[in-house]
Amino acid sequence: MTKQRVLTGITTTGTPHLGNYVGAIRPAIEASRETNNESFYFLADFHALIKCQDPAAVHQSTKEIAATWLALGLDTDNAVFYRQSDVPEIPELTWVLNCICAKGLMNRAHAYKAAVDANIEEGEDADKAITMGLFSYPVLMAADILMFGANKVPVGKDQIQHVEMARDMAQRFNHIYCKKNPLLTLPDYQVDEDAAILQGLDGRKMSKSYGNTIPLFLPEKKLQKHINKIKTNLLEPGEAKDPDTSAVFQIWKAFATAEQTAEMRQAFADGIGWGDAKKKLFGLINEEIAESRERYEDLLARPVDIEAELQKGAEKARAVSRPMLAQVREAIGISGLK
């Protein structure tokens, strides 16, 4: 049976939080264990430069995110886990794709359009503070995907457009340079409709941009304090509460079994106090992440070992990217003279 190649990018900005864990990291690690998948996971540190120009923050985030995935049990013997910047073939392919990608396609990119609209709304020049990195971000993402011949790219709905653009660029490249024997694989996006989207401390979607996150590997006391900050209504103990409008219940559901979810739903109907519900939520989350937290803290103290894992992944990634780029160079006429 032919394995399906699945590729996932992880942006290296900020500290991983509970929303990242249940929405992306946990399902991705589970998917990496499926025998019919060939999984590629990369730390998208070039992408991070678009949003963050603080070198220390990018460096620290790379360390924390790599340690998180390793601590949570990603098997790097079974998956390819690498840092984008360790694969020099990616930026070279990005330039090749830039040369066949229509500017009009980039003009339609959601992130660019949103930035332009925000500038116009504020009465500023349309392109104020918009870098070429932001504008051509989809081309770098296309190179990430096409370099490794990904069949499936798991993304959130906001990233579907970028995978479709990668597909457009692959088709155009194949049409121009290798019509008879297409070289670049046309990727498909994969959206998990059941992926949990957690509410944050203020009831909005948990997001670093809202400042409402619960970091994944907080020490126990700090985790409890964060959970205690989750916004609730003024209903007293003994008064029935609606689980479907409660961030406490929604986060509970993301960590609980079906049986535990049913029990908590009943507890809400019976009027469980908010303090009691939050205490139980802390216990549930802490039980799931306690061992991984220990491994995470241990790994952070050994950055050389994290680096060794990333270099191992880079070698595996380059075993794919080097021959692919050689074929691209041959196709476009940039190769050794014979």
Image (cartoon, helix red, strand yellow):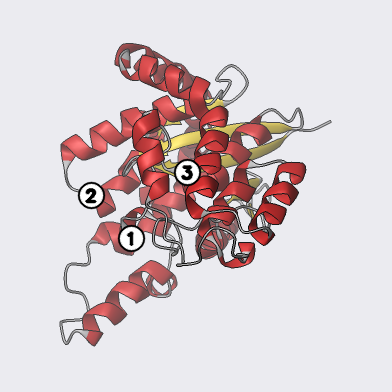
Q: Secondary structure at mark 3?
A: helix
- Tell me where residue 58 sits by quadrant: top left
Name the residue located 58 percent from the left edge and 58 percent from the top edge: 167
Q: Earlier in the sequence, mark 2 or mark 1?
A: 2
Bin the neighbour count of mark 3 within 10 Å (Cα to Cα): few under 14, some 14-19, many 20 and up.
Answer: many
Name the residue located 37 percent from the left edge and 20 percent from the top edge: 297
Residue type of the residue flagged with mark 2: Cys
Determine if residue 272 is in view: yes
Residue type of the residue flagged with mark 3: Leu
| Place of residue 290 in the rendered image (x, y in percent of width and height, measured from the top left) | 50, 24
User: What residue sits right under mark 1 in the picture?
Assistant: 210
Seen from this angle, which residue lies furthest front? 238
Label drawn at residue 250: none
99 on left or right of 286 = left
User: What residue sits right under mark 2 in the picture?
Assistant: 52
Q: CA distance from mark 1 to mark 3?
A: 14 Å
Q: Are marks 3 and 2 in contact (CB under 8 Å)?
A: no
Label drawn at residue 18: 3
- Tell me where residue 298 sits by quadrant: top left
Q: Earlier in the sequence, mark 3 or mark 2?
A: 3
In the image shown, does 136 or 178 lie closer to the viewer?
136
